[in-house]
Amino acid sequence: MNFFEQQQRAKKNSKVLIALFAAGVIGVCFCVWYVISIVFSVKDHELLSISPAFVFQNTPYEVTFAILVLTLLVILSGCIYKISQLVSGGGSFVAKSLGGRLLSKHRSNVDELMVLNIVEEISIASGVPIPPVYILNDESINAFAAGSTYDDAVIGVTNGAIRLLNRDELQGVIAHEFGHIFNGDMKLNIRAIGILNGILFISLIGEFLLRSLSKTRGSSSSKKGNGAVILLIIGLALYIIGLVGVFFGNAIKAAINRQREYLADASSVQFTRLPSGLANALKKIGGSSSALSSSNASEFSHLYFSSGVKSFFSLDTHPPLGNRIKAIEPYWNGKYIVPRVVNHKEGKESEKKDEKKEHITKVITTAAILNELNDIGTMTSEKLDNVGEKIAKIPPFLYESTADTLGARFVIFSLLLDKDAGVRKAQSDIISRDFFAQAANAARFESVSSETLNASRDIYLNLIQLSMPTLKTLAKDEYLGFKQVVNELIEADKNVSWFELNLKYLVLYPLDIVFGIKKIPREIHTHIGAVKFEVEVLLSAVIYSQFADNEKALEAFDKMKKAFGVSALKYVEFENISISLLENAYYEVQKTKPLLRKKILEMAIMCLKADGENLDTTDMESIHALCALLHLPISL
């Protein structure tokens, strides 16, 4: 099952989840209405004489409507509040809620650095932006992936997992979490948390009424006493209804999540090609524990690699450990492993064994890229094997510079420096205005820019990928300052090159989403006709990046139209395409469904090399920028 099928399946599961929760919400609303109606009917009738039919017949329609609407609004308010909190905070909100500490290469020990390297390798191999990594101060073995998009996703790992699992086992666990990212589980998880929080609001209102009444028990007035009794009954009923609703909501969530865990396990094994790594990690959990100590652990119970909280069997969000192990190792003998602390230093040298490999330039054809699109989101061990060679090409000083916020910003600035001495001087002045207050910063930038200038162009994409998780840790005002400098550097020569445009989309666009400046638009278009003009603008701009002559560009455009059977599309001459028009085209194309986005990307790739020649480094940058904008993970 490829990326696009997984996304479609995730959307189907999401609709099923919402439908089941909607039924539960309707049930909660009617329960609240029924209890309140009964309470007010008791004033004139004996409780035992009040039947359901009596309540339906004697409650005024306007009262019924008011109670149902008010209850629904309370639930929706709680749901919207929690979802907006999770979306605006990204995966880091979940990590911090669980007591997570952000890992940094400059402040990490050998074990933590190994985890960061594993996440880097899997990210680059899979084409997903490298997520920040958080460590939870728990001695149990567990991990999670959280976020609403690839751009704001984070990976969390417990201290116990780092200490008790070897590298292969950790790789299996982390690949499992990436499986959740690929399979579209993150949005599903956010919706589940949000809806459950909305139902819980009913219980919280009941609890509030009960607490308020406990402070006014001294009143002796008969009238007030009767009112207090009514509120007591309503409060107690709301409290119970809310808890029962959350119970059944958790049961629904758990039933869907258990199947997603098997799928993520399969993705992990497919990617690492080491089933024993994932299986042994599960066996070690069986021989120890995966429980988390955070008071918020139950709220995010379905996010974890293994069950993080104790629950009744019907609410267990994960399949039994034995079943998961047998799915990986059918002939498992049923014995768990009692874990011991692993000395990761012993494997440190073996991890570097491939660093001295002879670098072979990979020839990439248009056909190979189009074939790669069919495997988008499919994690393979071959891609993982190639990552070490990619990272080894990066000069050590530049690699280390991507690990802190100042160095990462300097790396991006250096990639934008112009070859013209005059323009370069103007760009240096822009950078010095905001960053060279300390002489050490100026010296460091000179070193970074010198290394970048001498580096091969084919490492630029990896430098950007490595810098992104660091840039995501900037404070918002720091990011806004960084963004302003990037835009000024691009505009310094009064001309925007194709590389500068690509860098802008690879760096600023995802960071705008992380910092809440932009939102990913909702996917609504299934047919190319709905975005015809925008696709024409996008493809025409891509073709013009290869053919400056309009006649040759038109010929290439016609060739692409015939190949894809889209004769209705028209070529837009480049002089009629402004930056704002192109950005609007990108925004509208993002509203297309995954399968249509794939077709648009295939057409763009055909436009890049309509002459059938091999794709070069510049083409790779364009493809990655397009994938970043279209939210499609691709590893090249």
Image: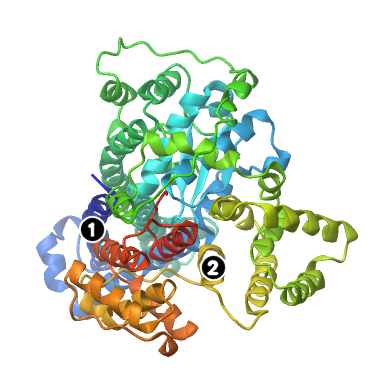
Q: Is residue 149 visible?
A: yes
- The residue that label 1 is drawn on is 15
Q: Give the x, y percent position of residue 376.
A: 33, 50
Instruction: Say whether disc 2 or disc 1 marks the residue closer to the N-terminus.
Output: 1
Residue 224, above or below 138: below
| Quarter-of-image position of residue 430 | bottom right
Q: Amino acid at mark 2?
A: Phe
Q: Amino acid at mark 1?
A: Lys
Residue 69, above or below 382: below
Q: Give the x, y percent position of residue 374.
A: 27, 51
Q: Depth-wise, is mark 2 or mark 1 nearer the camera?
A: 2
Q: How is the image coloured?
A: rainbow
* Residue at x-position 78% and y-position 74%: 425
Observer-nearest of 305 and 527: 527
Q: CA distance from mark 2 to mark 1?
A: 40 Å
Describe residue 555's horizontal placement relative to residue 143 as left or right. Answer: left
Q: Circle 1: is it few (<14), some (14-19), or many (20+) Cα within 10 Å? A: few
Q: Give the x, y percent position of residue 528.
A: 23, 74
**Residue furthest bottom in the image:** 576
Secondary structure found at label 1: helix
* Residue at x-position 55% and y-position 21%: 164
Describe residue 400's horizontal placement relative to residue 525 as left or right. Answer: right
Q: Give the x, y percent position of residue 47.
A: 21, 58
Observer-nearest of 290 and 299: 290
Q: Circle 2: is it few (<14), some (14-19), or many (20+) Cα within 10 Å? A: some
- The residue that label 2 is drawn on is 499
Query: Which quarter shows the N terminus?
Result: top left
* Residue at x-position 68% and y-position 64%: 413
Marks 2 & 1, CB-CB < 8 Å contact: no
| Quarter-of-image position of residue 548 | bottom left
Residue 595, above or below 337: below
